[in-house]
Amino acid sequence: MYTIIQFSPTGNANYIAKQLARSLGNQTKVLPLEHTDASQLEKGNHLVVVYAIHAFNAPRTVKRFIKNLSIDLYKQVSLIGVGCNTSWANDSVSKDVRKILENKSYKIIVDKIIAMPLTFIMNFPDDVINAQLTKALLDIKQISKDIEASNISHKEIEFKSNLVNFIGRAEPFASRFWGLELHAKKGCTQCGLCVRECPEKNIKMTNEGKIHFGFKCIMCMRCIYKCPVQVITPRISKFIPISKGYSISNYLKDK
């Protein structure tokens, strides 16, 4: 009955998607967005897109997926953005995605933000993270009820939210240059995990077995945090990634 497509570079959105699927019931399937062909999806009743927020916007990967959705594939669509807070600054994150869907005559039901731990620059304190996870589970229960009842989300978006959304549009271009800073230090095992998992197919392995980063980076941090030997790093902007990496599983041991 429900199809959940999740885009989760660092694991937060994947966690939300799985918890939502559990709440919606056994007829719900969860698919990774970057490994799913939008044109090959079967017709269904309700599509839920759970995505990580990048610079007050949906990532380029998500927008491209939505553009490739066929018309009339689903009766209803819901959008769940996953960011570090639910303040007014994130109210406009779905603006571009909504426009694409509405141009295809899709009916949008739930359009919500769920707060999860910050995944770059700094860690939130443990008590803040635990409070976020507790609140997220409560939000998921309410969202699942709204999806099942087709309760349409209504919210007034302030001008300042639209403004930060507009400013955030510079980030996708800037992230391309930041991606060129990435390199694999000595110690790379050439396992190819970063190549396989890059959502933009921006990482290649040369004939000599070296890792090469291109100009399509979206600054999602997946290659840095998933590297099993932690050798992927930016050359200059070392302050951006969390120094010890990030994994949501570290905070779920007692959940």
Image (tube, rainbow, N blue to C red):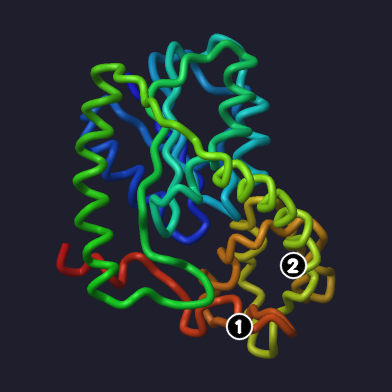
Q: Is the residue 219 above or below the residue 187 in the image?
A: above
Q: CA distance from mark 1 to mark 2?
A: 14 Å
Q: Is the residue 172 above or below the residue 128 in the image?
A: above
* Image location of residue 212, percent across then percent down: 79, 70
Query: Image quarter for residue 194?
Result: bottom right
Numbered circle sitting on residue 239 = 1
* Image location of residue 196, percent across then percent down: 62, 57
Q: Point out the tag, 1 or 2, that comes first from the N-terminus.
A: 2
Which amino acid type corresponds to the residue marked 2 in the rendered image?
Gly
- Label 1 or label 2, whichever lies nearer to me, is 1
Given residues 188 and 251, the one toward you in this image is 251
Q: Is the residue 134 above or below the residue 22 in the image?
A: below
Specify the quadrant that holds the C terminus: bottom left
Would you name the residue on which mark 2 appears?
A: 179
Query: Which residue ends up furthest to the bottom in the rendered image?
Result: 186
Given residues 80 and 164, the one toward you in this image is 164
Which amino acid type corresponds to the residue marked 1 in the rendered image?
Phe
Q: State yes or no: discs 1 and 2 in contact (Cβ < 8 Å).
A: no
* Image location of residue 60, percent across then percent down: 67, 44
Q: Residues within 10 Å of mark 2 (few under 14, many from 20)?
A: many
SS for callout 1: loop
Task: Kindly identify the residue that appears in the image at 69 percent across and 90 percent down.
Answer: 186
Given residues 250 and 36, the one toward you in this image is 250
Query: Which residue ends up furthest to the front in the rendered image?
Result: 159
Task: Kindly identify the residue that appears in the image at 32 percent across and 19 percent down.
Answer: 1
Numbered circle sitting on residue 17 = none
SS for callout 2: helix
Q: Is the residue 245 above or below the residue 81 in the image?
A: below
255 on left or right of 173: left
Task: Kindly identify the residue that appears in the image at 45 percent across and 43 percent down.
Answer: 81
Query: Image quarter for residue 55?
Result: bottom right
